[in-house]
Image (cartoon, rainbow, N blue to C red):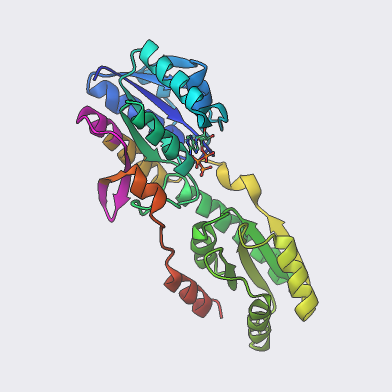
Amino acid sequence: MKRIGVLTSGGDAPGMNAAVRAVVRKGIYHGLEVWGIRRGYAGLIDGEIYRLGLRSVADVIQRGGTFLRTARSQEFMTEEGRKKAVEVLNRFGIDGLITIGGDGTFRGAMELNRLGVKVIGVPGTIDNDLAGTDYTIGFDSAVDTVVDAINKIRDTAASHERVFIIEVMGRYSGEIALTAGLAGGAESILIPEIPYDPQEVCDRLKESYEKGKKHSIIIVAEGVASAQRVADDIRSLSGFDTRITVLGHLQRGGTPSSFDRNLASRLSAAAVEALLAGKSNYMTGIQGSEIKLVPFEEAINKKKKINTELLELAQILAR
Ligand code: ATP
């Protein structure tokens, strides 16, 4: 293997730049040429490829987003589009590819593997929804952003004695809501893995008010319901004064946490080593303190189990 390519794809996540930096510098350390592909699979199909040197990744470790940029490509969803992508890789003489992204990105990578491309994935998504890795790059930073917002909203919630509902990302996964909710001391945490029962939320609110609590914070993952709907439910069932905040894309931005930078550095260096060892069709993952190779199939299709004990703990501690 002489020349490898690297791309970021799907939703951006803080720490993607640290991941690209690690691919470039670890690759060059091993005598490889490293080429950057702009705009994910869309840029691959269009041949937006350029060589990355050691200095081209200077001063990016602390930056959010991805300097390679990212995209969602409809064309790549077709066999014809993927064949074009393989032709481009062959034209540039790229014999190994590292894709940084989430489950969609890895589905695409599996298709490339089927067409004969050697490909290793690095989990870069704020969702933390991939099996075989305890954490994905960007999750920790997104949780910090949510906790920072909770802290600020708590100040105003306490002053006005109100119920605040904060909507966070997580269409199918409650990882962000749960981890940030526990860290931020939220009174209720609503996640897609558990059926939503508005009456139960109101009962808990009433109980804590009877115990002297004058304000509450409820975290809702977007996949459960909108913050507006939860606020309407609470108002009509209990009459509490509610306010909503939708954090939206704030959660994707900002400087990556040191945890995410270190995770990105380790997972990406391991991806280069995997390519050098002739491996393909794997994602690098962290399990405990060890870096492992996880088959794409398992990372995507095995359901990551949410730790519901944390939900119970959050409820006990927020009483
Ligand atoms: P995130 O979960 O953080 O948004 P992601 O990697 O899951 O990241 P997607 O938009 O789902 O983001 O996927 C990124 C790209 O991967 C898609 O735009 C598409 O080009 C490609 N892709 C997704 N699913 C498939 C598939 N089944 N086959 C081929 N390519 C796919």
- Which image quadrant: the N terminus? top left
**Quick one: 250 or 292, which is closer to the camera?**
292
Q: Position of residue 100 (x, y in %)?
A: 42, 35
**Among the 4 quarters of the image, the one containing residue 73:** top right
Task: Classify 293 as above or below 35.
Answer: below
Instruction: Judge whether residue 288 is colored magenta.
Output: yes
Does the rendering let one see residue 67?
no
What are the residue bounds of the magenta stretch?
271-291
Instruction: Judge whether residue 113 is colored magenta.
Output: no
**Quick one: 24 or 110, which is closer to the camera?**
110
Compared across the picture, whether 20 is left or right of 81 comes to left
Residue in view at x 49 percent, y 48 percent: 141
Q: Position of residue 128 (x, y in %)?
A: 45, 52
**Among the 4 quarters of the image, the one containing residue 197:** bottom right
Residue in view at x 39 percent, y 29 percent: 112
Does the rendering let one see residue 273?
yes
- Farthest residue in the top direction? 91
Q: Position of residue 85 (x, y in %)?
A: 45, 21
Residue in view at x 48 percent, y 27 percent: 79
Task: Classify 207 as above or below 235.
Answer: below
Residue in view at x 30 percent, y 28 percent: 118
